[in-house]
Image: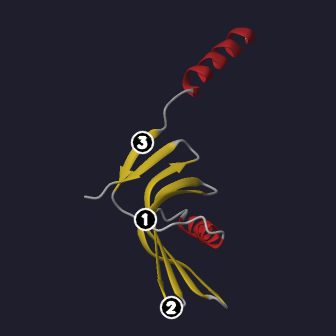
Amino acid sequence: MKKVFFSLLLMTSIAFSNEEPKIKTYNFGHNGMELIARSKKGTVIISTFNSKMSIRQDIANKIYDLYLTGQLETNKKVTVLGNEANVTGKCVIRKKKDLTAVDFYYEVVDWNTGIKEIYKRV
């Protein structure tokens, strides 16, 4: 009986392990400044648009790290690897004297749970 139960459990886990991520769309999000960093070189403001509330601060910190290492380019898509989700979006960098604004627009959120959310304008 134990072998039958174990076999059944093993077969169902294999059958459902290759599922595609569940795709959802959303048309709401948080817009705003998430991080302001000052240094001798100037001030950097990280803003996110269409972001998810639970991961916005984590993603903003990761964007700042990418900016410091020079991995961000304006008007280019970038994927940010977060703790709870990976976010793909477009980055826009604007500079004026010693002030730098880094705007990140969420497009796709790939949650670690297997759900994929795509931002869709209404």
In this rendering, the answer to whether 23 lies above or below 64 is: above
Mark 3: amino acid: Ile
Work out which quarter of the rendered image holds the N terminus and state it. top right
> Most extreme residue toward the right, as rendered?
2
* Label 1 – label 3 distance at C-alpha: 25 Å
How far apart in space, not on screen, are marks 2 and 3 (Cα)? 42 Å
Under mark 2, the amino acid is Lys
- Where residue 29 sits in the image (x, y, percent)? 40, 64
- At horizontal 32% and vertical 54% (from top left) the residue drawn is 120
Q: Amino acid at mark 1?
A: Asn
Residue 83: which quarter of the image? bottom right
Q: Earlier in the sequence, mark 2 or mark 3?
A: 3
Task: Check the image and report above or below for 64 versus 90.
Answer: below
Instruction: Identify which residue is drawn at 55% across, 62% down.
Output: 55
| Residue depth check, mark 2 versus mark 3: number of the one nearer the observer | 2
Mark pair 2, 1: CA separation: 20 Å
Task: Mark 1 or mark 3: name the one nearer the start of the chain.
Answer: 3
Q: Position of residue 37 (x, y in %)?
A: 61, 83
Q: Which mark is residue 14?
A: none
| Crowding at mark 2 (Cα within 10 Å: few <14, some 14-19, many 20+) | few
Circle nearer the viewer, 1 or 3: 1
Is 4 located above or below residue 77 in the figure?
above
Say whether residue 69 is left or right of residue 23: right
Instruction: Tell which of 51 and 104 is nearer to you.
Output: 104
Q: Earlier in the sequence, mark 2 or mark 1?
A: 1
Circle 3 residue: 23
Q: Which quadrant would the C terminus be assigned to in this image?
A: bottom left
Q: Pointer 1: what residue?
A: 75
- Numbered circle sitting on residue 97: 2
* Left-right relation of 94 to 41: left
Label 3: element kind: strand
Left or right? Give the position of 108 relative to 59. left
